[in-house]
Amino acid sequence: FIKFRNVFSSLNEDNSSSASATTSAPVHIEIGAGSGDWIALQAQLNPSENYVAVELRSDRVAQTFSKCLLHHDFNKSTAATKTSSSTASTKAHGPLENVCCVGSECGSFLRQRIKPGSIQTIFVNHPEPPTQTYD
């Protein structure tokens, strides 16, 4: 199983011996993270919480990783596009340290890598269904 206290610096290591692996910051998973827009915004808006982005396609994992590494201020860029008189631009910050990007099929990842009770919330936002071919 993944030891989230080794992944996220915000987790309380004093609780590592606890059977329930209680942490000081909740861990959330997004299944099918796509290009990472939603999870990067959530991580920015909730810096005291931790997020795991799970995506099967490697190009999308790379996009999510890049967004979290470059960490642009999404709120200001969104506000700037809505207000034509605003001169605000997208500001780059340090990397988002509360996001972990995982390239994996979600079912096996959840079964094989996630300890029961270690995740507060699982999000599934607009998944893209696999293409089915019926011969």
Image: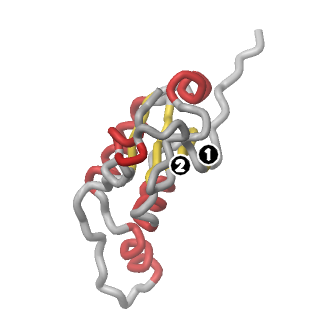
Q: CA distance from mark 2 to mark 1?
A: 6 Å
Name the residue nearer the viewer: 101 or 1.
1
Circle 2 residues within 10 Å: few <14, some 14–19, many ≥20? many
Instruction: Tell me the quarter of the picture where residue 101 sits.
Output: top left
Circle 1 residues within 10 Å: few <14, some 14–19, many ≥20? few
Measured from the top left, where is residue 37 in percent x and y? 46, 54
Name the residue nearer the viewer: 106 or 24.
24
Could you tell me the amino acid type at mark 1? Ile
Q: Which mark is residue 122?
A: 1
Measured from the top left, where is residue 135 in percent x and y? 76, 9
Figure check: 118 above or below 40: above
Residue 96 as seen in the image, left or right of residue 106: left
Could you tell me the amino acid type at mark 2? His
Query: SS of the residue at dot 1?
Result: strand
Figure check: 84 above or below 130: below
Residue visible at 43% across and 31% down in the picture? 2
Measured from the top left, where is residue 95 in percent x and y? 26, 55
Q: Which mark is residue 28?
A: 2
